[in-house]
Image (tube, rainbow, N blue to C red):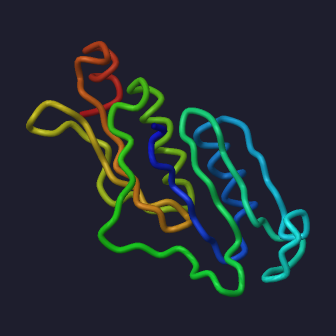
Amino acid sequence: MPAPSLYLHLPGTAADALEFYRGVFGGTVERHSFAQFGRTDGPGAAIAHGVLSGAVDLCVADAGAEDESFSARGLMIALLGTAEPTTLRTWFAGLAEAGEVVEDLQRRPWGASDGQVRDRFGVLWLIGYEHGTETAQQAASTES
């Protein structure tokens, strides 16, 4: 069974989101407009369904007339140990561009590192890793 996927309905910013997330996570983008799907509940050129496939898979769409745009409280998307520590640090920095670092990516008393960042689309991400997955030299050079 495939893992759950993040699917965001955005207020007319789906195309921007697909490019932003591709820039952060890499991967390939597929997009389909309302017109291509024969839908009349949104502007013809708007994104009815967009998919980022790669290290992180997610879907986005421009909210149609009957859809509520994304907002979240008490929810975060966890990317704990989903890639090498260097990659996770790069993703954290990328998500922070025009977003907000909620809690710096830092070493925790239990020995792992994690942090939280809310991206420009309002998605809160928890990114972290165990220190056994990197060399002590890498950790010392990038974190205090």
In the displayed structure, would residue 75 be above or below residue 57? below
**Residue shown at the point (67%, 76%) measured from the top left:** 63
Rendered-image quadrant of the C terminus = top left
Relative height, residue 11 to residue 7 (above, below): below
Which of the pair 6/129 is nearer the observer?
6
Q: Residue at x 83, y 70 (%)?
A: 34
| Residue 15 position in % (x across, y down) | 75, 61
Q: Position of residue 56 (x, y in %)?
A: 54, 39
Name of the residue lying farthest toward the left? 109
Q: Foreground residue, 122 or 58? A: 58
Q: Residue at x 72, y 38 (%)?
A: 28
The quadrant of the rendering that contains the N terminus is: top left
Looking at the picture, tell me which residue is in the foreground, 72 or 94.
72
Q: Residue at x 49, y 53 (%)?
A: 96
Can you say whether 124 is above or below 113 in the image?
below
Q: Quadrant of residue 12?
A: bottom right
Residue 61 x/y as whole percent: 68, 65
Relative image position of residue 62 (x, y in whole percent)? 71, 71
Q: Is residue 55 left or right of residue 113?
A: right
Residue 104 lies left or right of residue 26; in this view the side is left
